[in-house]
Image: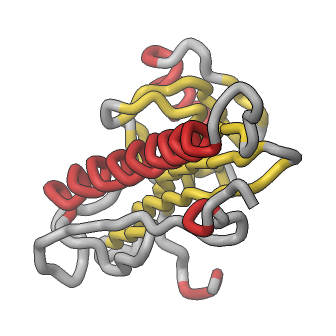
Amino acid sequence: SLVGSEMCIRDRFIIVVILFIVKSTYAQNEITGFLGVKFGDTNYVAIDILKKKFPQLEYNFPYINIPQISFLGTTFDSLVITFKEGKLVEGTFSLSETTSALLNEYPFRTQEQTQATIKNKQEYIVNKYTQLFNDIGNTFVIKYGKPQFPSEGTAIWRDNKLNSIKINSSIESRNGSNIIYFDGKLAITYQVGMSTDEF
């Protein structure tokens, strides 16, 4: 195979590392909302607040969708805000990207050149999404303390009302015919604490 063994990672996740250093059981500050809207706000209140800053806002009951939204220094593909019984319960910022490289470019390029291109594309996605994950995570650490459930590619902060912020990042690769794709994904989800009867 022209693809070296280190490149055959079709079904394997690439690890996203997280390094946070603070100690606390619950988030140091309450998690009440994002972008000036709060958990429990009605759809009308949320639309009124957000429409001023984001004219591209779209409302499709029970969701608000804001495409191409800037948050924490990053432009996300979208923010989807969910309402339950007319009240804001969740907001998810999403970002994804795919880059690809040919597995075999012979006769135009040598196997070494092809491997170098594949490695560069992979490193670009890994570095970008690891960096985003760590930068955003560290911004939350400053405000909310250490995440309660840090793991590979995931970090969750909860306050004493069980309101939460979760960052999730994944990097995968998949093969097409003579093409390898590297997919990077990052999501930040703000969620209101569930009452015990909803578990």
Report x, y in % for residue 71: 38, 33
Quadrant in the rendering for residue 8: bottom right
Work out whether residue 162 or residue 75 is closer to the camera in this orientation and state it: 75
Residue 33, compared with residue 36, is above or below; it is: below
Q: Residue at x 30, y 71 (%)?
A: 159
Report x, y in % for residue 120: 48, 41
Residue 57, compared with residue 38, is above or below; it is: above
Work out whether residue 12 or residue 52 is closer to the camera in this orientation and state it: 12
Work out whether residue 85 or residue 97 is closer to the camera in this orientation and state it: 97
Q: Residue at x 77, y 43 (%)?
A: 179
Report x, y in % for residue 7: 60, 60
What quarter of the picture does the C terminus occupy? Answer: bottom right
Position of 116 with respect to 10 (left or right) is: left
Q: Residue at x 40, y 77 (%)?
A: 151
Report x, y in % for residue 127: 38, 47
Total tally of numbered discs in the picture: 0
Residue 114 visible, this orientation: yes
